[in-house]
Image: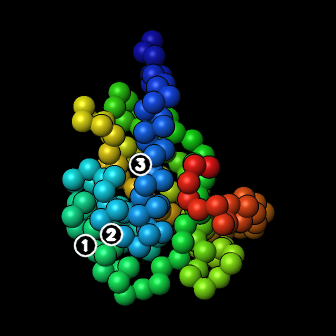
Amino acid sequence: MNDTRVAELSPGDESAVRALYHRVLEGWNLRDGAAFAGPFAADGEVIGFDGTRHSGRSVMAAELGRIFADHATPEYVAKVRRVRALAPGVALLDAVAGLVPDDAQDLDPALNALQTVIAVNAGAGWRIALWQTTPARYDLRPDLAAALTAELRALVGRGPGPG
């Protein structure tokens, strides 16, 4: 019988993957397209809350730069739930995130999301290959929506940093 378990990430690799995630959120909160895109692989992809896909670090930087120039984007708060290896040099990060509108003191629960990141290390350090944000609507499970809102609300004012 084949053993399909994947080796654990080293503490250093897990820390590096978490740091990539937080750097992207910091780039968003700074409204800096280049800082947002910096942690991605050159051919990385991001799928946004609304389903928009941006492929390539330079495309992401330019597109996000335009968005930040034209819109008052909300600020992220987030919490990493887990990081695990998928294969040697490939990791999955699962997080939850909320957004605090520019003119508000509290997050908007309608913007709560699950974020999934695939990070790769092909020998030159960890980079993000794919980032996907999925709305956390929890249809028919208002208890889960309320619990997530409470969890994220506790982070408001602390920024997107390690959590």
Outermost right residue: 143
Name the residue type under label 3: Leu
Circle 1/circle 2 CB separation < 8 Å: yes
Figure coloring:
rainbow
Name the residue type under label 2: Gly
Q: Quadrant of residue 65?
A: bottom left
Image side of residue 96 versus residue 55, left or right: right
Could you tell which of marks 3 and 2 lies nearer the N-terminus? Answer: 3
Query: For the residue carrying disc 2, how many other residues have a C-alpha within 10 Å: few (<14), some (14-19), or many (20+)?
Result: many
Position in image of residue 24 (x %, y %):
42, 58
Name the residue type under label 1: Ala
C-alpha span from label 3 to label 2: 15 Å
Name the residue at 37% across, 30% down.
Answer: 87
Badge number at residue 125 = none
Which residue has dot 1 on it? 62
Name the residue at 56% across, 59% down.
Answer: 160
Residue 76 shows up from this direction: yes
Q: Nearer the viewer, residue 30 or 52?
A: 30
Image side of residue 94 versus residue 60, left or right: right
Could you tell which of marks 1 and 3 lies nearer the N-terminus? Answer: 3
Outermost top residue: 1
Position in image of residue 2 (x %, y %):
42, 15
Report how many numbered discs are placed on residues in the image. 3
Name the residue at 45% across, 16% down.
Answer: 3
Which residue has dot 2 on it? 33
Q: Quadrant of residue 71?
A: bottom left
C-alpha span from label 1 to label 3: 19 Å
SS type, badge 2: helix
Position in image of residue 110 (x %, y %):
62, 76
Which residue has dot 3 on it? 20
SS type, badge 3: helix
